[in-house]
Image (cartoon, helix red, strand yellow):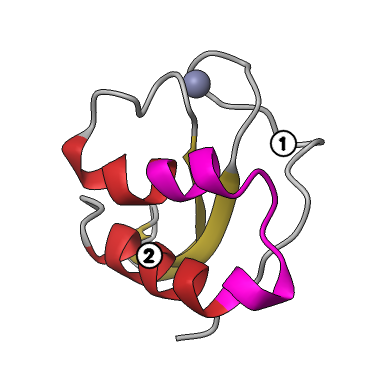
Amino acid sequence: MDIQLGTTEALPCRRCGGFLHLAVTLPHPGWCNAKGEHVRGYQTIGLCPSCDDADPKAQALLAFFVVNERAGIDSLSELRLLVEEWMTRQER
Ligand SMILES: [Zn+2]
């Protein structure tokens, strides 16, 4: 799975408007439009330190950002594993 990481400063949390640690864009499973055609798209999932604090699925990833204020080259492989685990736990 390809994961693109970038700054989230221009993308606030949709729930509280606060700072996001991370935002991941991935393919949406799709839906049917008014003509009955299957439409595909993308969805963005944000990791918010406030809104996701009580979510057990986000704990490992939130803990990463407590220890690592910013992801560096030496921590990218660990971050990648945590993001993949977090994303597989997301309800779609
Ligand atoms: Zn939030």
Residue range highlighted in magenta: 63-76
Between 5 and 72, the one nearer to me in the picture: 72
The earlier-in-sequence mark between 2 and 1 is 1
- Residue 10, x across and y down, in percent: 81, 36
State which mark lies toward you, 2 or 1: 2
**Vertical arrangement, residue 38 with respect to residue 24, above or below:** below
Name the residue beneath numbered marker 2: 82
**What type is the residue that disc 1 sits on?**
Leu
Residues 13 and 74: in front is 74
- Which residue: 62% across, 16% down? 17
Q: Which mark is residue 11?
A: 1
Q: Amino acid at mark 2?
A: Leu
Q: Please identify the residue farthest to the top as the structure is shown.
A: 16
Q: Residue at x 20, y 50 (%)?
A: 91
Disc 2, disc 1: CB below 8 Å? no
Q: What is the magenta segment's predominant secondary structure?
A: helix
Asked if residue 67 can be seen in this view, the reply is yes
Numbered disc total: 2
Q: Is residue 63 above or below residue 2?
A: above
Secondary structure of the residue carrying tag 1 is loop
Q: Does the segment drawn in magenta span residue 41?
A: no
Instruction: Give the x, y percent position of residue 84.
Output: 36, 71
Residue 14: image location, x then y, percent: 54, 25
Task: Write the residue at 75% across / 59% down.
Answer: 6
